[in-house]
Amino acid sequence: MRVNSGMKISATIITYNEERNIARAIESLRCSDEILVVDSGSTDRTIEIAEKLGARIVDHPFKGYAEQKNYAAEQAENDWILSIDADESLSEGLEGEILQVKKNGPEHDAYTVPRLAQYLGRWILHSGWHPDRKVRLYDRRRARWAGEFVHESVQVDGRVGHFRSNLLHFTCDSLSEHLRTMDRYTTLAAEQVVSQGGKIGWSKLLLDPPWTFFKTYVVDRGFLDGAEGLAIAYMAAIYNFLKYAKARFMS
């Protein structure tokens, strides 16, 4: 269903070989007036699937997550940007809240959404993973993406509102997939540590990983997420070890 109002939204997705996820993401964006996919050289069926579902495709070489998402916002037809990743989709409740803002007109310059992640087939409600609020709907005249390497976020110069309904995040289906993803992201995180001039002492390598496990599993109640919560805590500890170990050998 399309809503005719003064507020028009361009949904943007950056992609690289996302044939597994892209259809689900695009099909959840019925509240948008345009769907723009910025692809960085996919060799699978990502572009074919996106085009069949009515998305506009722009090719652009990848130079970083924040830069790619800002480029996508610049190519959009409308000032209001709904930015999601290819492995995310809007819940029905979130779609309804966005449609209500379109109907009544925005009262803020950007809106955060809570993200609910599915990991190894289970929805994760603890482990520091929920609500994991992120700005996803914003006026590009008052906000833009920032972050040189990893963990990019939208910086807003204005008022920020908050939606209640979840953005659904479909993460890893297997531990093997998680390990492959973690290898890529820990390299980026290590590059960020080095660029900031951080010195990596032995305390970071010895103490930070076990503290991360304890915080994730006990403080953030990961034990309530069952075996998946235990896996998340162990992976979080390994992530921090690899990040600092890679940074130490880079510097």
Image: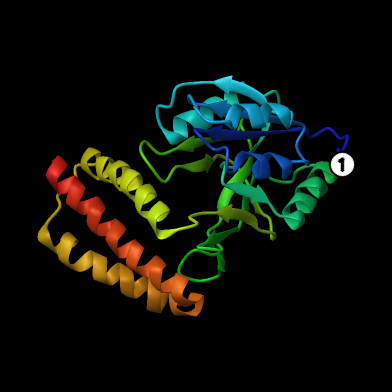
The C terminus lies in quadrant = top left
Q: Quadrant of residue 241?
A: bottom left
Q: Position of residue 37 (x, y in %)?
A: 61, 29
- Amino acid carrying mark 1 in the image: Met
Q: How many marks?
A: 1
Q: Is residue 50 visible?
A: yes
Q: Position of residue 250 (x, y in %)?
A: 15, 40
Q: Which residue is mark 1?
A: 1
Position of 206 compared to 231: left or right?
A: left
Q: Secondary structure at mark 1?
A: loop
Q: Nearer the viewer, residue 234 or 44?
A: 44
The N terminus lies in quadrant = top right
Residue at image position (48%, 26%) is 40
Position of 136 compared to 6: left or right?
A: left
Q: How is the image coloured?
A: rainbow
Q: Position of residue 105 (x, y in %)?
A: 80, 42
Residue at image position (53%, 30%) is 44
Vertical comparison of 24 with 217: above or below: above
Q: Nearer the viewer, residue 249 or 87?
A: 87
Residue at image position (50%, 34%) is 17
Q: Nearer the viewer, residue 199 or 243?
A: 243
Q: Is residue 198 visible?
A: no
Q: Position of residue 183 (x, y in %)?
A: 31, 48
Vertical comparison of 129 with 106: above or below: below
- Mark 1: few/some/many CA within 10 Å (<14, 14-19, 20+): few
Vertical comparison of 241 with 90: above or below: below
